[in-house]
Image (spheres, coloured by chain):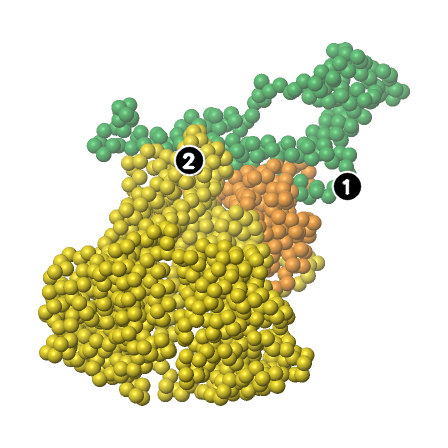
Chain colours: A yellow, B green, C orange
Amino acid sequence: MTAVLERVEPATPPLPPRHPSRLARWWSSWRVAIRLARRDAWRGRGRALLVLLLIALPVSVVVAEISYSLASSKARASVSQALLSLGTVADARIMTAPASASQSIDTTSASTGSGPRATRADLLAALPAGSTVVDAGGSAPVVIEAGRWGITSAVALSDVRDPLDAGRWRVLDGRLPASPSEVALRGDEIHRLQAHLGDTLTLTTTSGAVHVARLTLVGEVEPFSPWIAYGDAVALPGVLPVDPTTTAYGPVAVDAEQQKLTLAPSEFLVRTSRPLTWADVRALNALGAVVASRSVLESPPAFCPVDVVCLDDGPVPQPRADPAFEDPQALEAAAREAALVAVVVVLVVLQVALLAGPAFAVQLRRRQRELGLVGASGGTSADLRRAVLASGVVLGVAGGLLGIAIGWLGVLVLGGMLPWAPLADNGVRLGVPPLPWYVLGVALIGVIAAVVASLVPAVLAGRGDVVDALRGRRPLPALRTRTPVVGLLLGAAGVGLLLYGRAKLDTVILGVGIIVGELGLVLIMPWLVVQTGRLGRWLPLSSRMAVRDSGRHRLRTAAAACAVAAAAAAAVATSTWAASESYVTDSTDVPYPPGTIAVQVFVDGTPESQAGAATLTARTTGVLESVAPGSPTAVLVGLTPKGASTTPGSMNQGSVGCVVPVPAMLPDGSTPQRGVSAVAPAGGYAGDGVEWQGCSGRSSADGGLGGEVMLLRDPASLGLLLGPIADVTAATSVLEDGGAVVLQPGSLDAAGKVVLQSGTIRDDGTPVAGPPFRVPAAEVLAGALPASVILGPKALAPGGAAASLRADDANQVVVVVAPSTADRPDRPTVADQITIGLAKARVNAGVQAGGSVRPDSAAVQLAVIGAATLLLALLAGLMVTALALADGRSDITTLAAVGAEPRVRRRIAASSAGFVAALGCATGAVSGLILAWLLNPMFNRFGSQTTVIHWWLVAFVLLGVPLVTAGAAWLTTRSRITLTRRRD
Amino acid sequence: MAIRHGLLALLDEGPAYGYQLKAAFEERTGGTWPLNIGQVYTTLARAERDGLVAQLDVAADGRVVYEITDAGRHEVARWFASPVRRDAPARDELTIKLAVAVTAPGVDVKALVQTQRSETMRTLQALTRLKIDAADRPDPESDTAWHLVLERLIFDAEAEARWLDHVEARLLRAAASTTSDRTPAPDGTDRANQGSAR
Amino acid sequence: MTAPVLELDDVTRIHGSGATAVHALRGVSLTVAAGELVAVMGPSGSGKSTLLNVAGGLDTVSAGAVRVEGTDLASLSRAALAAVRRRSAGYVFQDLNLIPTLTAVENVALPLELDGRRRVRSYALAALEEVGVADLADRYPDEMSGGQQQRVAIARALVGERRLVLADEPTGALDSETGEAVLALLRRRVDQGCAGVLVTHESRHAAWADRVVYLRDGCIVDSTAYDVSPGSLETVR
């Protein structure tokens, strides 16, 4: 047969040429890969759905969060509240304010001028002709009593008879007051008073002149919006004098003669003949009022955001921030926060990738023949890699989009559509939540997670031999000894970073250290899987097979075990920190001991306070004596440096705090702020300013004035103040000798003295710190924490260690009483009686009952942590077992073919899942303990070196979680074996 | 014997001359086995003697028209109904040659097998080429029969080649075990003695 | 005489090393020209599959040279070898030739798409037409019979500019009737100007080739070429 020399050209269309551009060719290859991935995902829908959900759920949570916060932060809420406060009839609500005011559209922001407020007559003159004005505002703080029950409250004084007021109060029972002898209350208050409709209530004012009114309770009401009135009760105007200090926009100018009743109303509802425009509002602003106009609220002008102070045609120009004043620390703090967010994102991506990894690893084996065919048809290693990565992309994109949909729908349904709208903001439905374009970025992170999950299988696919793939042979890739060694090195690097971060107190470095450590664990895990797989020798047959099978399929087992390990490590670490912290805080988190009541008298700039701290204290002890006669008391007084201003309520008061030596500084996770006085061991100090880190780790700026260092007037009352402590006599004698009692552990220096420092603020606002001084002290671990440091009178005496300080009632006064009368169910509690008595005595005070208010949340915390770990272990273990069982190439199919009993399948599933969980939990627990031990001093607020381990939790993690996982696998596995064709 | 039954079957369709029968037979078997007219007449005479056919007529030029008898029809029906027996295999030259060669000293059986196989393969190739070339033969009537016969030859050749493969493998196995018997063991004793000890 | 499409020049392939070394091929030389179909026969373990693997660059040789359309495969990188498989040589396997998640026309177009060509559908359809299964273009492999799948596989193996088809027991999973049809197709395509290497253990199928080569233990022990075209069966007998 002779060879045909010329090629017989069939009548076919010409062969399309190779695309000249490399990019186009690259894209062509990706198109094939994506097509293969798409179709393969459709074929293995169950597996694909699993990965989809793993990606979609975290994405949906974040998207829901974004959408919700945008929906509820849209100023719609404030506009809705403002509209609600108008009721159904009124066209506007006007609040007087000093003239030349300016406001935001929704009235939440306003800046007041300095002129007089508009009066009713002014308003009538300024409003369009034919307008009606109704008095609607003002309230009076009162004590309401009914029989022997009483409450402190405030009464809104509003003309509810006028039809203009319609739609502002919801009547739940009875009716609104129609005459000056009637009052309506909110349901809670009626309940607390144990009153009924028709009862007579006694209302006593607690500020300004004393005025008592007896009113009949005629209804149970509720304002439609919290903006409507300040108060829990409503009565007609004139029944009680309005408290000028509770009007909006600054106190109404008080008449020189304090005793005169000020009846000038400050809030009005109006109905106008034509809608009030923004121009009208601005005119009224100039006159001296802030206006919430219905027409403006319903269609706000476009030139201003609704919550920013708005001028005639635009928002108030913001002064350009002077770069010289730009706080570099603020930038650094923002960058740090961004870095922390990035660390968290990386950890979450890693966890999702570890959970989804097994699915891709199994998929790789299933597609082996297909990939071999691609290789035989001329696909390069890159094409094979792309084929696997494409399935990561396809599932990631689908999962991300699904997550966006779920998140958005969740917010829509829960916030807007359901009748009870659990997410509604203040009763205002969210409507359609917005979905900004950057949620695609969140979905992109989901895609990245899926691609990372498919990375290792992709690399293996590219390296694989085409011939082996076609034959269906899968030689076990040799475990390169390099990999676990690299893993160990990474683990060591992670530990190093953690130590470095701890020294530098830098959470970002810590986060990076955790990531590096976890990557090291991921690299070591396959080796661990193989080594522990050998232990299966001692197990019964089916378990041995399961363990051997897991060991042979290193990739998927290692990925699942790593996911479990991460969760277990987190659980053990956080529980240890919580335990160590609560070990110290359990006993020191309570301000006042059980069985006591503390009264903190506020000496501020109110008219009542003008009486002076001494008078107020005397009134307080008087009330205490009348409510709980003969009960012992302890009085704590704040301290100020000598030379500071003594005007009560003035911001220039000095403050005193205790300072701790540098090594024990605890910044709550951030670097010490500029201006913190750091006392060097040698005795000098660095830094300036009055902000410092106190012994408790809190800045004095957020703890209020004082509170750190206080004077106990009578050292003998120390026992009452602190509750039961080990040696009260020793501590008392320390006080009496001029020393101090320190209640925060770790605050003493080497010589057993506490370091105190005081500071003042100059007239120009710059802080000035005084020199630190040392007071001999005793450290006491008490059951209460009224202050950080307590001094006795002797220390303040001339020649005492704290002679530069003086007692300042005006700063703070706390009277702690241990009442000898017990609470009875048919009477108000002692604390309530004290509250009412103080209110009537015109003492502005806070009353707090001592004792632990916080229930023991440790158990709850542990339960939550344990449950979360278990959940993750279940997820990982069950998933990987289901994948193994469905995988036709595994030994399990062979077992079925040789006629093993059906129960065997369950045993295998249980062993497989249990093995993964046990391995993960063991490595996780060890890592968690290391992590906790390393970082405990940092996260523990008090710098305690004690590491307390919740052994119960560790035992649960090590034993309980694997057992439960195995049990769950046992229960959920079908025992019938279906023969699938083994493709080996 | 096959020829007798073949002719009988043809006669069953209708009386015919000897020459007619010869032509029909050759056509129906694809021309693979051309018949000698004398062979035909001899067979017919014997069949007549056995009572399976009868002379119907004698034409003027001496040609005899035969027709089938009832006994003959019966015989044809029996022939079609019963399978061809294979108990007495025909003597095949190749089989005899190899059977003898295997035990004959000084004969390179491997070469014999290889040579034969190449020849068989060449035959097979030729037959296959015939089949390919005949793929578009227009004559349908004799085509099926011809293809049947052709494929029978092809399968026979294939069977021969497979048998030769089989023989070769068997020879290899035998050679492997005898060489190990004959190779001296490391300590010098004859491995054959060792074999019995195993 | 044109240059041979495939040339194996004293090719040796050894797996492993030392005592456990396996000589899959020893000094094998073979040339296949365009229009020529060569059958390779031999028992299992004789190196047939290895020969096919090295011919297409799926496996490297330990000694000797493999030249496809004049290019020595040893000088090519992995990516270039893949290019050879895209543009010069196509494989047909015994079964499961087609990617199950792609339709017939997508399977055929695969080498072209991997090569970076666009709009290849009509070309692939024409290729399917040539093998007589154009009506199955948009069907998936599991909707086709074995014979139809093999036809599609042959179409894919020779799509584009490929001139060498490497077939590994392509009729092994088919009944004899369908197998014959597949071989007839292969024969026709080779006649149209391609070169083909057919590995088989069935003599009947090997007989379709112009030359039959016997492999034993990695060596070629014999080769038959048919030279004479018979006129009738009498000559053969």
Q: Is residue C171 above or below residue A394?
A: above
Amino acid tagged 1? Pro
Asked whether the residues under marks 2 and 1 belong to the same chain, the reply is no
**Disc sitting over residue A76 in the figure:** none
Q: To which residue does mark 1 refer?
A: B138
Q: Chain of mark 2?
A: A
Measuring from the top left, give residue A403's x and y in whole percent: 52, 58
The alpha-carbon separation of the residues under discs 2 and 1 comes to: 67 Å
A428 and A46: which is toward the camera: A428
Amino acid tagged 2? Arg
Question: What residue is drawn where x is 46% and y is 59%?
Answer: A189
Q: To which residue does mark 2 refer?
A: A906
Q: Chain of mark 1?
A: B
* In the image: residue B130, left or right of residue A726: right
Measuring from the top left, give residue B159's x and y in whole percent: 56, 32
Q: Dot 2, crowdedness within 10 Å: few (<14), some or many (≥20)?
A: many
Question: What residue is drawn where x is 50% and y is 70%?
Answer: A239
Rendered image quadrant of residue A457: bottom left
Question: What residue is drawn where x is 58% and y is 84%?
Answer: A121
**Whether residue C67 can be seen here:** no
Circle 1 SS class: loop
